[in-house]
Amino acid sequence: MGLDMYLNGNKFYLTSWDSPEKNIMEDGFRVKKKIIELGYWRKHPDLHGYIVEKFADGIDECQEIELLKEDVLAIIGAVNDDKLPHTEGFFFGESSPEDKKDTIDQLEKAIKWIDKKEDGVIKSIIYRASW
């Protein structure tokens, strides 16, 4: 038990009606979406608290929270500037100063992923916690 935190990327594939051969297929069916694991944290409650406070109006129900590129950049800034709020919760554990570099690395990779353009693809970044 504990706080598990996931940063996922959704890739939505647009349907090519004019050139059906361009559609992504799997097992004989058209693929509409893939989920990419962009980041994962175990028991980093301060990061969780910041995301919930800033991007979910303080509502913490293990819901999906969509993050825009600008949001991820703001999170990187908060981590860099040590502006994450101290956050506690049942089995949340404690954030550690050693989490900083890994957190920034994962968030920067997510920015690179969202910035990479692909024809016929719409991307989004989703944060979700579980405990």
Image (cartoon, rainbow, N blue to C red):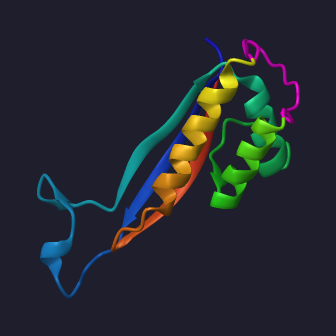
Left of 127 or right of it: where is 89?
Answer: right
Query: In the rendered structure, does residue 118 fall within the stretch colored magenta?
Result: no
Name the residue rendered at 50%, 62% in the picture.
Answer: 115
- Left or right: where 51 falls relative to 18: right
Indicate the position of residue 11 as horizontal and vertical percent values.
41, 58
Q: Position of residue 43 (x, y in %)?
A: 67, 18
Most frequent secondary structure within the magenta stretch: loop
Residue positioned 16% across, 78% down in the render: 20
Q: Residue at x 80, y 41 (%)?
A: 78
What number of labels is visible? Answer: 0
Instruction: Find residue 108 and report its horizontal and vertical position in percent.
Output: 57, 45
In the image, residue 121 sits, relative to residue 91, either above or below, namely below
Residue 70 x/y as whole percent: 70, 60
Residue at 54% in and 30% down: 40
Image check: 107 left or right of 33? Answer: right
Pick out the residue farthest to the bottom.
Answer: 18
- Asked which quadrant contains residue 2, the reply is top right
Region of the chain picked out in magenta, as a range: 82-96
Q: Hey, which quadrant is residue 22 in on the image?
A: bottom left
- Tell which of 8 and 100 is nearer to you: 100
Image quarter (top left, top right, bottom left or bottom right) of the N terminus: top right
| Residue 68 seen in render | no
Q: Is residue 93 magenta?
A: yes
Q: Is residue 121 above or below residue 3?
A: below
Asked whether residue 89 is in view, the answer is yes
